[in-house]
Amino acid sequence: MNPTPDRPARPRPGLAVALGLVILCIEGYDLFILGAVGPSLLSHPDWDATKSTLGLLGSLTALGMPLGSIAAGWAGDLYGRRLPMAVSLAWLSLSMLLSAVAGDLALFGATRFLTGVGIGALIPLVTAYVSEAADPARHSLQVGAATTGLAIGGIVTGVLGRTLLPEWDFRTLFLFGAVPLVLIPVVWRLVPAVVPDHPAQAEAEDAAAGQDEPANRLRLLLAPRYRRSTLLFWAATFAGLVIVYGASTWLPTLMVDNGYDLGSSLEFSIAFNAGAVIGTLGAALIADRGLLKAATTVGFLLAAVAMTILSTPQPRPLLLLVSAVAGFGALGTQALVNIYVAHAHPARLRGTALGFSLGVGRVGAIVGPSYLAAVTVLISSSKAGFYAFVAPAVLGAVLIGSLRPGRRAFASAPADGSSAAEAPLAR
């Protein structure tokens, strides 16, 4: 199909996946950096930080995320993905650089909040952008490949943390925040200024959304045709992000509490993220065979099983393997939830759906680190932190299992001429 001023050319899948992966790699680096520097931050001679402080810093980061997710998702549907993505990269970069020069704990906490806004903005924008570029037959695989950037970034954080800490000041790791600035020209060149659609899709979506009126977007998500799936997606994202952000903040510290040195705990963190990469790609291949719901449900259950095993004394190779399974159960499963949301909504509603799903679900990211901190403080057992992950993992499995199957959203225009918005993947 030739591009027109109203119907721009769809981005090439390979370039979109590569760009999305690099952006989310940077985001994953920042997501896991607090966990990597946690033990060093707790031992800082001037800041007098405690385990509760670490949980608070994780929650401050997460507190900014709903603002970024909702605003960017909505802006991406209204103005295209390019401008909000460029602004979000600049915001994230400057916030990380401020963290690197923060002179006290209060200023450091403020920079973590600002960083959270940038993190929250990029995930729905990148997921929507790659989803729109992906080949229909490989949708889950290509979106999943891009989202593995989060875990790859976590691996980079773990490697740098093990190499540089505790000899270097932990704030040095935040200097890598300059990298997103380099990507802004690339985003401006590759990302379409407006959202590309298939003509049949656009016509049906315009009818459903009142000719693209912004006020109708959230109303449409909460209308009867979408309400059940919307609320279930929000709740499942909450459960998933409790696990993701609890693990990203607390996994190395929990391993130290269980008798491992800092280097060993960071090895577990690397295994955690490597498992997320491999597991996400494998699950995405399964999902593209019509088993997205099953793959996501199993992912949550694997998180519960893995965290239970990690709490028990096991041979080192087995613990590394189980850490990898836990990584898929946390990061990989949340990636599948995001893919599910993108898959179940039309292009002009996709950013808003992802933004609100991640925005409302970010309450889990806010609660996660403090929830883990409270459990480890109130319960003296070193195993308590691992057990705290089981409840949200089982809850997530139940929520995804409650989605009713339906036809793929907007695979084609409905034959009866009704709005395509009435044929979501899950209701």
Image (cartoon, rainbow, N blue to C red):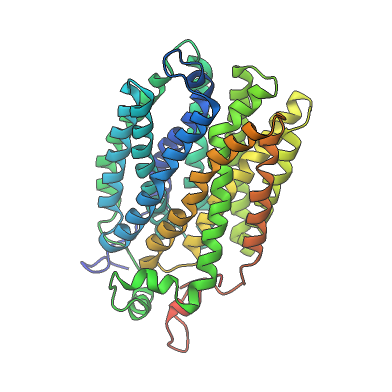
Res. 136 in view: yes
Q: For the C terminus, which image quadrant?
A: bottom right
Is residue 201 left or right of 277 when viewed as pictured? Answer: left
Which image quadrant is residue 10 in? bottom left
Figure check: 37 above or below 150? above
The x and y percentages for residue 18 are 41, 43
Figure check: 204 above or below 170? below
* The one of 368 and 73 positioned closer to us in this rendering: 368
Tell me what residue is drawn at x 50 percent, y 55 percent: 338
The residue sitting at the front extreme is 378
Q: For the N terminus, which image quadrant?
A: bottom left
* The one of 385 and 24 positioned closer to us in this rendering: 385
The residue sitting at the left extreme is 5
The x and y percentages for residue 135 are 47, 59
Which image quadrant is residue 252 in? top right
The x and y percentages for residue 110 are 34, 34
The residue sitting at the bottom extreme is 416
Tell me what residue is drawn at x 38 percent, y 60 percent: 351
Is residue 135 left or right of 314 when viewed as pictured? Answer: left
The x and y percentages for residue 426 are 56, 70
Res. 198 in view: no
Tell me what residue is drawn at x 58 percent, y 74 percent: 406
